[in-house]
Image: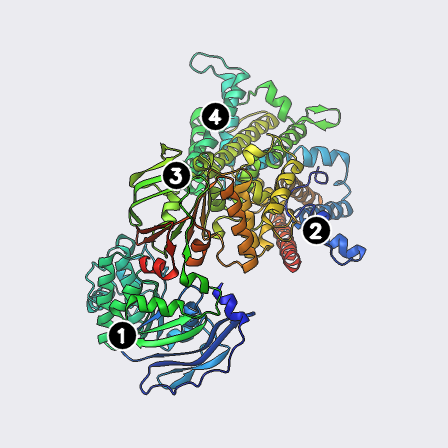
Amino acid sequence: MQRDDAGLTPIPPSPSHDPPAAGALLALRGVTKRFGGATALDGVDFELMPGEIHGLLGENGAGKSTLMKILSGFQAPDEGEMTLRGEQVRFSSPAEAKARGIGMVYQELSTIGALSVAENVFLGDQPTTRGGIINWKRMNAAADAQLRELGVQVDVTSRLSALPLGLQQMVEIARVVFSGADVVILDEPTSALSVRESERLFTSMRELRARGTSLIFISHFLEDVLAVADRVTILKNARKVATLPAAGLTKQRLIEMMIGRDASTLAASYQEGVTLPPPVEAPPVLEIEGLSIPGAVRDASLTVRAGEIVGLFGFLGSGMTEIARALFGQLQPHAGVIRLDGRPVQIHSSTQAKRLGIAYLSENRRATLFPRQEIYKNMTLAHLDRLVPPLFRKRSELGIAEQMVKRTGVRPPNPHLLAGYLSGGNQQKVVLGRWLTRQPKLLILNEPTRGMDVGAKREVLDLIKGLKAEGVAVLLLSAEPETVMTEADRILVMSKGRVTKEFAGERVSKDLLMAHA
Amino acid sequence: MAKDMPQGVGAGAAGTATARPRASGWARILGWAGQRARLIAPLVTLLGLVVFFSLTTDSFFTTRNLWNGILSQYAVVAVAAAGTTFVLLCAEIDLSIAAVSLLIGVLSAYFWITPVFGIDFGTWGVLIGLIAAALIGYANGFFAAYIRIPSFMMTLAMSTIALGLAVWVTQGKPIFKVPGLLRTLGGTGSKIGPVPVPVIVAAVVLLVADIVLSYTKFGRYVYMTGGNREAAEMSGVNTRRVVALCLMISGLTAGMAGMLNVGKLNGANPQPSNELLIFTIASVVLGGTSLFGGEGGIKNTLIGVLIFGCLRNGLNQVEGISIYIKQAVEGFFLVGALLLNVVALRLERIRTQAE
């Protein structure tokens, strides 16, 4: 949404850029990147000093990931320049960036669980004897020494997958650092870590800083950034808001800068906040009490009533998705009760969940769409057993699909088209339509409008509102504050596996939501 | 059969598509064919082979050869291939086809001549054979789908088990007495009018399989499970059950093929041979069914079996090819046919993307 706006606003003459500060290890000057009509980065300056931990903040779509991709060589900027150790550079591939000492640690680790810790530290670069055989002794000793330097003590011969996630991450960081990187970019490293694991990560980050390595720390967790960063850069709507020393900054101040006080943006109304409607008075359809899923959710409780949209707001690793998956029989909770219409249920499979009247729209489109099958087959699948006679002709099924194509507004409205050739937004409508061929009791939507253009977003949200009016209980999961704020009757905020705050019948604003996430 | 049952990629898309600039006649025909590349490409191969062998030999295109040399000979393969199609469509594999067919063939003959537990089963042994075949297939399916042993390994192991059991039951000796029912169903000499009975059996099996795949929910679940297992699971399809049942069907048809074979040879010999396995999987894939699941069908399999049958039968009749090189030539032809399938599908994909 924000990015779309940025694409429409005329770009003012680029501000005069300061000369690079003396001694900057890595500097960007006036970097601009456009994708089609949308501007993802607009004349951004960025500076990284040697031995610095630099936090990079911004909302979804503010340009963080584009900046990161430019730094790590995945994308080339359209305008602007990049200097590394005072020398102008232009990376044409991630390999080139890596060769120049810029390493990335992704949210999704690229280590290999089945190999030992030491093998992972030296992945692709194992020390060998003269005969070309891996020198295990030397490798294990070196891996152990290097991890110790980061303050990590583990048995380097153990399988990586046996370690907790936090340690696995340390192994990946060690690999990146010891393959020669002196700039390490960490993308959301703490999202899946416990508080203690995060602390350990910060200790290692400080350790690295002391060795002269520079780190860029991208995160949604503002406390984490404030805890460890020396300076922070805030991006908003593709532009840099400021670079400030972290000392003396507060979370509140950061949120203000990330959201901005710019009245011209569409998001303006949300900054003032919206008032949630009075609570829905209807019998609860879904009640969750004390739900715990190992490693993901701790003691979460929530209720969704008939004709109510409950918004769940949280970032990756908050545990929202795991709750949804547990409701759809994909994860087995460790503890807690799930009640549907007042009756406790144990949901073991998606088939059972479907029979109970639960519909789930996953955030992962690859896991929902059949790209090589026609739209009509995609749409009738979920309730095929109730829609068509035992021996069906295509016609009986086509009628249902055609209706649903109309209702969801799929374009082009041709049910014979292969679903893979639709745009992302229309694919989402197809998957949503699949669940509407029979009225669900509980509809769980995980990021239903992510990546959609404004028009398609509106259509999908209107459809959801229509269902609410018909008495469907809707659980709406999103990491975009706007989505839950505009649509939900009540909003629950989740952070690191816990429900941290519930908003009902009161004013809620973006910064309030983010303060609890 | 192939024409009037719409199914597969993009069937009928032209009918409701949004207005497109008018294309010339040829372009329209090419476009129509392009959308059905998965069926048209093997059909072209088949026609090519028929024309080629008709021109190069005198004996290929004769009623006698078509009925007895090809259709009757490859009826057994067609029956096994019908079940294998289910397995490949849901992106699994069954390597136990040959061994299961051998075991079931042997069992049905064994029940015919030997009372088991004091009961003389007689022709009912055929029914027991079919039940055993389904059970073996379901065991494959259960371990592959629920226990998650890869079907490749599970069916390979089952292949060894079935072979061992066949040898054990017969103590390694061939059985020369065969139930009359099997001689009627599988024997090359048994005919209704000009039509050999095994061909009728194969036609019935293929027809039933086609109806199940094209017109039942289970059939649709098979395609969707193969097309995207995770998405099928997330749509509430019990994908494990679908996979288990597909392997069960494959076991059942392998057993039927084994019985037909016993009837055809008028004896059951526990001699291990993987010919049926290779013939069956080659036929299904030649017909255009994807090894990666979700695309293809029984119509493809029918064409595939015919391609395979014509190729082997035809090559035998071409004069001037040394008997020692024939197998290699057959292999080259197979590669050529597979190449045509791949190229045609690539063209189709490019076309649909351009639209």
What is the three-letter code of the residue carrying label 2? Ala
Packing grade of label 2 (10 A; few <14, some 14-19, many >=20) is: some
| Element under disc 2 | loop
**Which of the marked residues, 1 or 3, is nearer the chain's N terminus?**
1
Q: Residue beneath label 3, please? A: A286
**Residue B17 shows which numbered tag?**
2
Give me the C-alpha separation between circle 4 and circle 1.
72 Å
Which residue is farthest right?
Answer: B25
Q: Chain of mark 3?
A: A
Residue B138 drawn at (x, y percent): 46, 31
Asked if labels 4 and 1 share a chain, the reply is no
Q: Amino acid at mark 4?
A: Ala
Residue A125 shows in the view? no
- Helix, strand or loop under label 4: helix
Give me the C-alpha separation between circle 3 and circle 4.
46 Å
| Quadrant in the rendering for residue A202 | bottom left
**Viewer-side residue, A377 vs A251:** A251
Q: Which callout, 2 or 4, points to the residue nearer the camera?
A: 2
Q: Is residue A286 above or below residue A145?
A: above
Q: CA distance from mark 2 to mark 4?
A: 49 Å
In the rendered image, residue B193, in percent from the top left (x then y), is placed at 75, 24
Q: Nearer the viewer, mark 4 or mark 1?
A: 1
Number of marks in the rendered image: 4
* Residue named by callout 4: B132
Q: Nearer the viewer, mark 3 or mark 4?
A: 3
Percent x, y for residue B347? 65, 57
Mark 3 closeness class: few <14, some 14–19, many ≥20 residues within 10 Å: many
| Residue ID for mark 1 | A230
Q: Which callout, 2 or 1, points to the residue nearer the camera?
A: 1
Question: In the image, what residue type sits under mark 3?
Answer: Leu
Viewer-nearest residue: A200 or B169: A200
